Image (cartoon, helix red, strand yellow):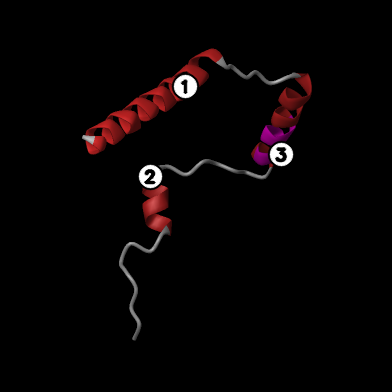
Amino acid sequence: MTTIIAIAAFVAVALVGWFIAEGKGKFVTYSNNEQEDAVLAQNRCQLEEKGYTELNISDVIRTIATTGYSAV
């Protein structure tokens, strides 16, 4: 009988934690202020000047070792 109560308590705590986590994502919002936007814009300009481009999946596959490791 105590096992059933323990499982029920665990499920109840898990559901309450899940509800809090989901509610936090929906009700607590964050927006950047002017200083943060300026820093992001400055970083974006610096990356564009240096020729940074985001890799797509084919670039990632080409640059990582997909053949495995040979110890010999």
Of all residues, the one furthest to the top in this rendering is 27
Task: Give the vertical position of 8 relative to 68 (above or below).
Answer: above
- Which structural element holds mark 2? helix
Whether residue 20 sits left or right of residue 38 in the image: it is: left
- In front of the other: label 2 or label 1? 1
Start-end of magenta stretch:
42-47
- In the image, what residue occupies the spot 23% across and 33% down? 4
Residue ID for mark 1: 20
How packed is label 1: few (under 14 Cα within 10 Å), some, or many (20 or more)?
Answer: few
Q: Nearer the viewer, residue 6 or 71?
A: 6
* Dot 1 and dot 3 residues touching (CB under 8 Å): no
* Dot 3 and dot 2 residues touching (CB under 8 Å): no
How packed is label 2: few (under 14 Cα within 10 Å), some, or many (20 or more)?
Answer: few
Residue kind at label 2, given as amino acid type = Ile
Residue ID for mark 3: 46
x then y, percent, for residue 5? 27, 31
Residue ID for mark 2: 57
Residue kind at label 1, given as amino acid type = Ile
Q: CA distance from mark 1 to mark 3?
A: 39 Å
Q: Nearer the viewer, residue 33 or 24?
A: 24
The quadrant of the image that shows the C terminus is: bottom left
Number of marks in the rendered image = 3
Q: CA distance from mark 2 to mark 1?
A: 35 Å
